[in-house]
Amino acid sequence: MDEMLWRHSCPGRIGMRHMRTMNTIPLLLASALMLSACGTSNGQTASKNPTMDTNNQYDHSTNPYYSHTDTAKLDVPLAEWKKILPEDLYYIAFEKGTERAFTGKYWDFDGIGTYACAVCGNVLFRADSKFASSCGWPSFFQPERKDAIHYHADNAFGMIRTETTCGRCGAHLGHVFDDGPKPTGQRYCINSVSLDFIGKK
Ligand code: FE
């Protein structure tokens, strides 16, 4: 899974255990490319794969907290999340990891339905707020409801960004930028790993 996880200027940051496996110079070059790509990410490229499998990408049968209707805030110890969640999801959600651009399940997907937090099931976005962005991560111009997402100042890596987390479970999702399309002008840049797509039936 290490190969799939990469730092970029949108969702989060790479964990130290992953940094140790990389060469410094290639990492800097890759980061610079990612920064450049994400800085101009509101291009309107065509989305693909509208008919791909729309089932959740995880098995939630052992996750007692997962719900699309319960909006009560959760206070689950990290040790418990670590037992319940797949390794890649735990890394993104609670170690502020990032999937590599253009590798996630949903960056160029435009199915009809909603997107939920892959950790707790909290509904985060409607598919009709998703737009085709050239940044390589799923991008939305507004959340499904006001409290679905929480916001935090993130000054890591010499950048001033706004981190987004799930309003129910606190999982890291990505970041929000003010270079999105109308009507909000915002771009919620979210890791595919953090999302479950719920197809409209
Ligand atoms: Fe959540």
Image: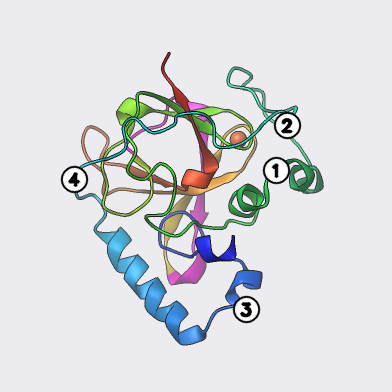
Residue tagged 4: 44
Q: Amino acid at mark 2?
A: Asn
Front one among 184 and 85: 85
Residue 6: give x, y in percent of width and height: 49, 64
Residue 53: give x, y in percent of width and height: 44, 31
Front one among 32 and 22: 22
Front one among 144 and 98: 98
Residue tagged 1: 85
Tell me whether circle 3 and circle 2 mark residues in contact (CB < 8 Å). Answer: no
Tell me whether circle 2 and circle 1 mark residues in contact (CB < 8 Å). Answer: yes
Q: Who's the residue at 46% across and 78% down the image?
A: 27
Residue 79: give x, y in percent of width and height: 81, 48
Mark 4–mark 2 Cα distance, whole angstroms, equals 37 Å
* Position above or below: 85 against 197: below
Q: Who's the residue at 29% across and 63% down the image?
A: 37
Q: Residues within 10 Å of mark 1 (few under 14, many from 20)?
A: some
* Position above or below: 54 against 24: above
Residue tagged 2: 63
Mark 1–mark 3 Cα distance, whole angstroms, equals 24 Å
Which region shows up in magenta?
A: 140-158
* Secondary structure of the residue carrying numbered label 4: loop
**Ligand 1 neighbours mark 4 (CB distance < 8 Å):** no
Q: Earlier in the sequence, mark 3 or mark 2?
A: 3
Q: Amino acid at mark 3?
A: Arg
**Ligand 1 neighbours mark 3 (CB distance < 8 Å):** no
Left/right of residue 49 with respect to residue 147 in the rendered view: left
Q: Earlier in the sequence, mark 1 or mark 3?
A: 3
